[in-house]
Amino acid sequence: MNKNNITLALAITTAMGISSHAAAAGFQLAEYSATGLGRAFAGEAAMADNASAQFRNPAMLTYLKGIQVSAGAIYVDPNIDIEGKHSIFGQANTSDFANSAVIPNFYFSRPLTDKATIGIAFGTHFGMRTDLGTDFKAAMFGNQADVHTVEINPNLGYKINDQLSIGAGGRYVMASGHFGAASPITIPGMIKKGQHLKYMEGEDNAWGWQAGTAWQINPNNRIGISYQSAVKLNLEGHANGIAFDGLKGGSYAGTLPLELPASAEIASFHQLNDQWAVHASVNWTDWSTFEKLEANIPQLGGNKHIKNEYWKDNYRFAVGTTYQATNKLVLRSGIAYDTSAVDEANRTQTIPETDRTWLSVGAGYAWSENLTLDAGFTYILAKEANMLEQEKDLPILGKFNGQTSGHIWLAGVQASYRF
C-alpha cells in the first residue's frame, strides 16, 4: 500500500473518530468489541461469542459456527485533568484535555473445512490524542501527543482435535502520529507563545503477526493463550522547532521510530451450570521497549532528542461473569485492574499514564436465530498520580510538579449475524 493510500485510510478513520486518550495502559486500546466491553474484557482469549474473537486469539475461530459477520463501535469519553505548579511561571492547570472518540470495528469469519476457519478483522490496538494547549504553563515539556493506528488482521484457525485448537494471523498496521512541545510565553525578538520548541509528525505502515491456542479441558472448562508481536514503525514526515535548529524556524524532512509493543494473554472460561459462567484473564504488554522519542533529521546532523519515556512492562488482571437470563437474553459483568506502564519519576504530562480500575456491565439479545445485538458499558477510574517534568540538561526551563487524575466512560454497541 503506497503512502497516498495510507493517508486516505487514516483520514477516513480519523473522520470516523479513532482518536482518544487510551483506555488501556500507555496508548494501548482494549476496545475491540462491545461484547467484551460488557465483561471488562475478562477471559477474551478463551471466549468466542462472535467473529470479533479472532482479534484477541485466532484459535477461537474454530469455535464459530457458519459464516459470521460482526460490526460495532465503542464511544470513549475521557475526562483527564492535571494540576500543578511550574517553578518559574507558577500555577499550571489543565482539564479535560483528552478528546472523546468513536472506535469502530468489523469482523468476518468463514469455515473452510470442519477443522479450518478463516477470518479477517478491522480494528485498532493502539491510539491516543492529548492536547494541553499553549496556555499550559509547562507546555515546554510537551503539550501534544497523537497516535493513530488502523489494523487489518487476516487470520486462520485450525482444530487439531476436540481438545486443542491453534491459530495465527498477520497484522498490517497503518499508523500516523505527532509529538510536540511549545513555548508557553513570548520572548520578544526570539520566540512567540505557542511556537514549537520540538515537533515531529509522520506516518508509516508495517507488518506484525499474532498466534494463539485454545485447550478445551472438558465441555465446561477452557484455557486460551494468545500473543501479538511487536510492530516496528518508522514514521516518515517532517520536523520543526527552535530546539532543533536554533532560531531558524525551518521545516525539515525526518523520521521518528515508534515501536508498538508485543503483548500476551492467558485466559480461562468456566461454565458453572446452565446459566452461570465465570472467566478471567491476565495480560502483559512489553512497554519497557518504549524508552524515548527521538527524531532523525538528516539536514540537522541526525538524531534529535524529543522526550525520554523510560516505561516499564504493564499487567492487566480481569475477572467477569456471564448469566444466561433467558433463551434470548444474556447478561455480563466484569472488573479489571490495569497497572501503570510508568513510574512516578518518569510520568509525563502528554501521556499521563497511571493505574486504572474498570467496572463493566453488558447484555446480549438474540433478536432472531441469526442476529444478535450486544451492548456494553464501562466506567474507568484513573488513580491519582504525581509527576515531575524537567529537562536536566536545560535547568533554565525550570520544573513542573503536578498531579493527574480523571475517569473515562465507555459505551459500545455491536451487531453479529450468522449465515
Image (tube, rainbow, N blue to C red):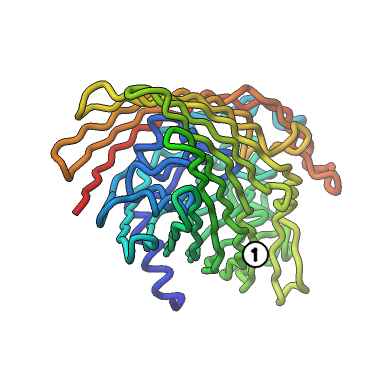
What residue sits right under mark 1 in the picture?
Answer: 256
| Residue 24 left/right relative to 334 | right
Residue 119 appears in view: no
| Quadrant position of the N terminus in the picture | bottom left
| Picture coordinates of residue 418, whole percent (x, y) | 22, 50
| Quadrant position of the C terminus in the picture | bottom left
| Picture coordinates of residue 122, whole percent (x, y) | 38, 57
What is the residue that sits farthest to the left in this orientation? Answer: 368
Q: Secondary structure at mark 1?
A: strand
- Where is 214 relative to 40, above or below? below
- Residue in front for this viewpoint, 332 or 111: 111
- Residue in front for this viewpoint, 122 or 409: 122
| Picture coordinates of residue 378, whole percent (x, y) | 41, 27
Residue 313 appears in view: yes
User: Residue sitting at 33 percent across and 24 percent down?
Assistant: 274
Check disc 1 and give the amino acid type.
Leu
User: Residue sitting at 72 percent across and 62 percent down?
Assistant: 244
| Picture coordinates of residue 305, whole percent (x, y) | 75, 58
User: Residue sitting at 70 percent across and 42 percent down?
Assistant: 313
- Residue in front for this viewpoint, 308 or 122: 122
| Residue 338 left/right relative to 174 | right
| Residue 273 left/right relative to 253 | left
